[in-house]
Amino acid sequence: MKKSIFKNGVTSQSQSLPGGNPSSERPSRPVVGRRSFLKGLGATGALLVPATALLTTTAKAKNPDASGKLTKGDAAILRFLAVAEIIETDLWLQYWELGGQLNVNPTNEFATPTGGNTPYTDGLLLLDGDMPQYINDNTDDEITHVAFLEAYLKSKGASVAELDLLNGPTFRTLKGSTADGVDPKKVGKRLTNLTQLNVDTSYWTRYRSDNKNPDLGDTFAQAVNPPNGIINRTAIPRDNDDTKGSSPGKPTPHVQAIAFTAGFHFAFIEIGGTSLYPSLAQRVSDPEVLRVVLSIGPTEAMHFQTWQDKAGNANTGNPPLTDVDPKTGSSVTFVDFHATTDPLLQANLIMPEPTFFLNRNFPIVSIIRPTETKGAAMGAVKALTADGLFNGQSEDFFELIADLASDADAARRESDK
């Protein structure tokens, strides 16, 4: 198994989905409010990622917008990417606790093994026999992204005050799951909510289309549960009631639906980073910062391609599976994508189909989409919010991440100023 360089206790994460709304492109908001907010909360800079302590760094700036040796825009971009990775790590750790532990492999170093949740893991194994390993590796990757971006910012003398705040307990107040396999010490201390998701599955048809591109204003149909997609569904067992009736190797249809929801959510999360990094890279000034962004970003694309391949195995060889959530009444139906004749749903089309890029006068080309840089960071915040990940979070949390997104979207190359 792949080892992480990080020890127990990391609970950070984040991810993002760009493509945003042109109206979100606006100058950075005044920072006085955020500085006062950080001061009022007593941001301490107590990082949960010990690897950052290994670097000899410039003394941490008191100003949360301080950029040190970086341009203001480069610092803002890296800070927002780190925020996205913090959010992502938080949700991946929840998936890991329940379905990614590989029978409590003792070499796992990024969190405390709990034994996992057998019915949920059995549901995930219907997607692929390697799901626990892939969940481990994806979680590990996001943790390393957070640690590196934070350490890099600090090495340049840039402030990480907001990152410390998100890594700390202030916003980690969401309940999360109480099912078997959850670390009891983390109940009520989550940053993200995986129990009320609205999973936008239009990424599936977007990457199989050969004549549409979101950057050109095109929209795409939902692949799962059309026309609305997956609405108000949990992607993890909320408690042991969700797994009742399962036996080893035989998850109930309800557990299967939860696991299939997770499978499509995995890809939704990773498609965000796949677009976010190249979208923001277009605004970077320093060649080394550009190297950082271009080196991390493609790993998100590798994650996305893996997860969409596995999601395509939901309900393979079976009649449609319909599940009505006993707690919310929300219904979802999963069909066998391997049996479809619709190329926009075909399960094994996991490589980006060529489509139009820049304008429709050029020949079609296989590309990442979207990569429009305008409003990319705010678009990511909006997409994650619409996903339901932040249900239950405070207004202060929303204000903080929106402010950081605004700063990233306001960044400009030095040569463009």
Image (cartoon, rainbow, N blue to C red):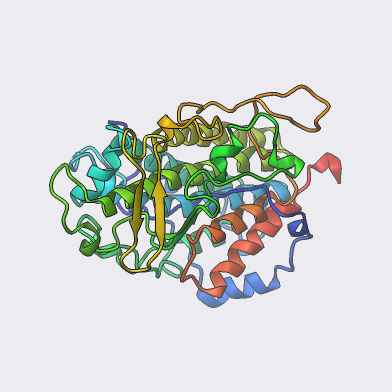
Question: Left or right: 140 with respect to 358?
Answer: left
* Residue 243: image location, x then y, percent: 21, 57
Point 58% across, 68% down: residue: 398
Point 77% across, 54% down: residue: 22
* Residue 192: image location, x then y, percent: 44, 61
Front position in the image: 152 or 388: 388
Task: Please say whether residue 113 is visible from this viewpoint.
Answer: no
Front position in the image: 346 or 55: 346
Front position in the image: 250 or 366: 250
Point 56% across, 34% down: residue: 344
Front position in the image: 333 or 243: 333
> Where does the N terminus fall, quadrant-wise?
top left
Q: Residue furthest left?
A: 247
Give the vertical position of 295 relative to 242 (above or below). Answer: above
Question: Left or right: 347 with respect to 258?
Answer: right
* Residue 203: image location, x then y, percent: 56, 41
Give the vertical position of 169 relative to 113 (above or below). Answer: below
Task: Please say whether residue 200 is visible from this viewpoint.
Answer: yes
Question: Left or right: 268 with respect to 375?
Answer: left
Query: Which image quadrant for residue 337?
Result: top left
Give the vertical position of 260 relative to 364 (above or below). Answer: below
Point 27% across, 46% down: residue: 99
* Residue 24: image location, x then y, percent: 73, 58
